[in-house]
Image (cartoon, helix red, strand yellow):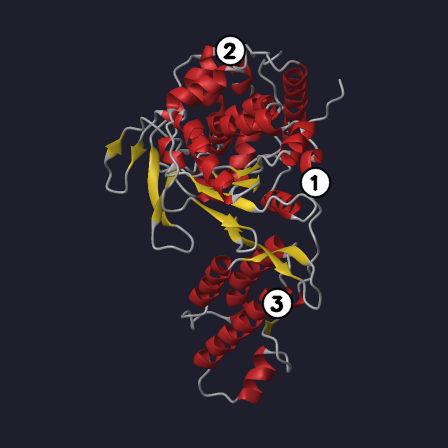
Amino acid sequence: MNTSALSLSPIEAEARVLGIQAKLHRWATDDPDRRFDDLYNLISDPAFLLVAWRRVRGNKGARTAGVDGQTARTIEAGQGVAALLEQIRADLKARRFQPLPVRERMIPKPGTHKRRRLGIPAVRDRVVQGALKLVLEPIFEADFKPCSYGFRPRRRARDAIAEIHYLASPARNYEWVLEADIEACFDEISHVALLERMRGRVNDRRVLALAKAFLKAGILTEGDVRRDTDTGTPQGGIASPLLANIALSVLDDHFAERWRDRVERAKRRRHGLANYRLVRYCDDFVIMVSGTKAHAHAIRDEVAVVLSTLGLRLSEEKTGVVHIDDGLDFLGWRIQRQTRRGTTDRYVYTYPSKKALRAVMAKVRTATRGGSDLTLGVLLHRLNPVLRGWTNYFQSGVSSATFQYLGAFTWRRVIGWLRRKHPRITWKQLRRRHLSGGWWPTENEVTLFNTAAARTSRYRYRGAAIPSPWPSEA
C-alpha cells in the first residue's frame, strides 16, 4: 500500500482511510487465518493521523490535558496541528515514538460511593492510539462474534438489551441468568494473553511493540507518583476498549463454538440438557440459560476457567444467578418477566432501573441545589442535554411511567430553584416572568425539556444482521 506523504483535505483523508479499512476487513473476512504484515506504515500514514486527530479534537476529552499539560486547543494555538502530525509521523517512522504515562483521575462510579481510575493520555498519544485503532479495528471486527456489543461500530447497548429480551421471551425460554461481573477488568487483563490474541491476526512486530508500549506506559497518580502498569489497559485511552474486546473475545469464541449449532441446541433441549447464550457489552456480560438453576450455577465455574487465561476473575460479591421472573439490572435497564395487566399472559418487560433513575435524579438535584446567581436559561441549558440524553437511551422500553415521574420531579426542582432565586415575587409574577404565563419553565426560546412528553417505541432486535461499516464489495 502507498503510504507516501499526502497533502489531503479532511474529506479526502476520511475517504482514503475508509477505503483501506474496507480492504483490511474484506481480506480478514475472506481468510480467517490470515496474519497481516506491514500495518505499521498505515499507522504513520498522514491520512490515518489526520483522521485520528480530527476524532481526538472532536471528543469532549480534547479539553483535558495529559501529563504534558497540552490540550488540543493549546496545540492549535502554539505548535500547530500540521507540525504536531509531522513530528508524530517522523517519530513513528524512526521508531523513536514513546508513549508518556497516563495521568490518573479518580472519578465516582455511578450509583455508588466507590471511585474508579480513569487514565488520561497525552494528546499526541491519543492521536497515535486513534491511528492504531483505525488500522486494527476492521481486522478484528471480522472475528468478533455477534454476541458482543460494547464499543463496536454500529452496535449499541440497546442491541444487547434486545437480545436478552428475545432470548427470555416464551418462544425461547432462556429463564435463568448468570449475572457476571469481572473484578477490576481494565486493571488486571494480562498483557501476555492480550498480545498473544493480537498475534493471531497481526504479524507486524512493530505494531505489537507499539501496542505493548501503550500497555506498559505507566500511570502518574494524583499524588504525582509514577506507577508501572504490569497488567491492564487503563480506561480513558482511545484504543483501550478495542484491546479489551480483543482479550475478552476469548469468552465469545468459547460460547460461540459450543452453542452455535441450532440443531444441536434443539437436540439438547429434547434430552433435558441446558443451552447457554452469552450477551456481552465489553466487560459487562450475562449468560442466558435454558435449563435449571443448577445448570446456571455450573456454567459459572466454566466461565471462571476461561477468564483465568486472561488473568481475570469473577467478583464473588456481584456475580450471581437470578430467574427472569425475579428480574435483573443490566446496562441501566431492568429486565423482568411479568403478567400483563388484565390477562394471564406473561411477557418480558424492559424499563429504566431504579439505580439509573436515582442517578439522573441526583444530577437534576445537584444542578438545582444552588446557583441562584445563574439565569434560568443557563440552568435549562445544563439540564436539557441530561434529560434528553437519558430519555433517548430509555425510550425503547416500557418507560412512560418513569418519564412522567422524572418530569414531575424535575419540574418541582426547577420551580423550587426559581422560588429561592426570587423569594419576594408572587406566584403570579413568577409565572408571568419565567413560565410564559403557563406552567412550564421557559426563558427566551429555551424551554425545560419535558420527559413526560417523550414517546416510547420498541427497539427492533437485529441479531446477527447488524451491518458492517465497511462495504464488502471489491
Residue under numbered circle 2? 203
Q: Residue at x 59, y 23 (%)?
A: 143
Tell me the quarter of the picture where residue 201 sits: top right
> Could you give the CA–CA distance between mark 2 and mark 3, rounded to whole angstroms?
54 Å
Mark 1 falls on what kind of element? Answer: loop
Q: Give the camera-side residue of 156 and 225.
A: 156
Residue 146 against residue 319 in the figure, above or below? above
Asked whether the residues under the numbered discs 2 and 3 touch, taking CB atoms below 8 Å apart as contact, a structural biologist would say no
Q: Residues within 10 Å of mark 1 (few under 14, many from 20)?
A: some
Residue 103 against residue 49 in the figure, above or below? below
Q: Give the camera-side residue of 409 and 335.
A: 335
Report the amino acid beneath label 1.
Arg
Report the amino acid beneath label 3.
Ala
Q: Which of labels 2 and 1 is toward the front? A: 1
Q: Residues within 10 Å of mark 2 (few under 14, many from 20)?
A: some
Tell me, for residue 462, which label it has, or none. 1
Q: Residue at x 63, y 79 (%)?
A: 436
Asked whether the residues under the numbered discs 1 and 3 touch, taking CB atoms below 8 Å apart as contact, a structural biologist would say no
| Image position, residue 229 (x, y; %) | 31, 28
The quarter of the image holding the C terminus is top right
Asked whether the residues under the numbered discs 2 and 1 touch, taking CB atoms below 8 Å apart as contact, a structural biologist would say no
Residue under numbered circle 3? 401
Residue 429 against residue 148 in the figure, above or below? below
Q: Is 396 on the left or on the right of 89, as rendered? A: right
> Could you give the CA–CA distance between mark 1 and mark 3, rounded to whole angstroms?
26 Å
Q: Is 90 on the left or on the right of 442, as rendered? A: left
Q: Earlier in the sequence, mark 2 or mark 3?
A: 2
